[in-house]
Image (tube, rainbow, N blue to C red):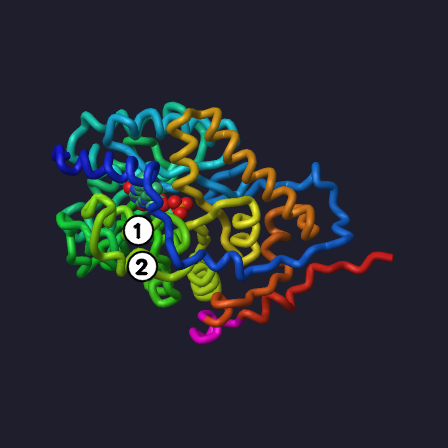
Amino acid sequence: MTEETEKRKADHIKICLEKKAQAKKATTGFEDIQLVHRALPEVDRAKISLSTSFLGKRLSAPLIVGAMTGGTEAATQINGAIAEAVEKLGIGMGVGSQRAAIEDPKHEKTYKIARKKAPTALLIANIGGVQLVHGYGLKEVNKAVEMIDADAVAIHLNAVQEALQPEGQNSFKGILAKISEIAGELEKPVIVKETGCGISAEDATSLEAAGVKAIDIGGVGGTSFAAVEYYRLTNGKIIDEAFWDWGIPTAVSLVETTQTVKLPVIASGGVRSGLDVAKSLALNANLASISQPVLEAAVKGAEKTEKLLSRLIDELRTVMFLVGAENVEFLSKVPLIIGGKTAEWLNIRGFDTVKYAQRSTLTVEY
Ligand SMILES: Cc1cc2nc3c(=O)[nH]c(=O)nc-3n(C[C@H](O)[C@H](O)[C@H](O)COP(=O)(O)O)c2cc1C
């Protein structure tokens, strides 16, 4: 990895910690989703089961930490803290793009720390989809997987970021065929993930046909890579904010994807609370994933990271209690109301928003 790339990676971390690189006017759409309160939940909060399985791996809660870092000095500490916390909690994590270590083995330790500190947790390797168009193939993806003994690999899509970076790679031509090739040949499952601009129904259909095993929809409403690049380019002073909020809001992307494909789906992009996780699962996501707030905790250590994630899990348990869900499966069937701009968007795109409100898990007991 060149010094320039290393600096870019360090800049991303610094900006995401020090600036407001979050969606500005756009929101996730979670505010348009209401779960129906049960005054008679008929469950014991302490006995609610949050456990689930994802791509054959057991998780004690339907939550993972999203891909963030590797390849810089600070990354070892950050990945180590996240790994320690997720191992303790029995959940999972992704590491950041492993290109740095594929190009220079001296960076491997900044990723390997994850498996070292999380010997049993779900670990997801990471590689850029655009890299596959520009020379990477099965060999490099395998290297990323083996480096951290990963359970799966995420191929990330970041067209906005590549378009805005002066050094960005602007050709994505042939990317689906490359994803399909890797998905067909790799022994581990391939997840395709967006990085904050969302996945449409049409792209979800293409990815399912390409043989990927899961989709992380990475929608608008949380970290904005257009914002990150804006700060990098302008030092916060000038110009182009046009793409700051570009993309498909998380709740919209989630409905478009879950109503269109049969694949497991990860909800991410602005997931900030246990309530957001519960809404994601009620919208039929299999897991939710959170990134930027965990970065803030991870620089302070494993304990703070564990505390943040535990708080989210505990809040999820409370929501499940209040909607009478004794397990994660039940949560995917509870009635909910979709209103506001999220319903408007989905209705214009031809998706059924009423069916969620008409779901009935209400049992009558006399
Ligand atoms: C500092 C930082 C670095 C990131 N680097 C990567 C990366 O290397 N690969 C990737 O797939 N996603 C990367 N992401 C995107 C996240 O995985 C996630 O999709 C995005 O931040 C939205 O989630 P959030 O709103 O919870 O932060 C990064 C995010 C942050 C904050």
Gap in angstroms between the C-alphas marked 1 and 2: 7 Å
* Disc assigned to residue 210: 2
Residue 153 in view: no
Magenta highlight range: 345-352
Residue 348 forms part of the magenta stretch:
yes
Query: In the rendered image, which quarter contains the N terminus?
Result: top left
In the rendered image, which quarter is residue 11 located in? top left
Q: Is residue 349 left or right of residue 273?
A: left
Q: Position of residue 269 (x, y in %)?
A: 41, 50
**Amino acid type of the residue that numbered disc 1 sits on in the rendered structure:** Ala
Q: Which residue is mark 1?
A: 183
Q: Counting other residues with Cα less than 10 Å from the Cα at mark 1, is it few (<14), some (14-19), or many (20 or more)? A: many
Q: Residue at x 24, y 30 (%)?
A: 72
- Circle 1/circle 2 CB separation < 8 Å: yes
**Amino acid type of the residue that numbered disc 2 sits on in the rendered structure:** Ala
Q: Position of residue 176 (x, y in %)?
A: 25, 59
* Mark positioned earlier in the residue sequence (1 or 2): 1
Q: Position of residue 230 (x, y in %)?
A: 24, 49
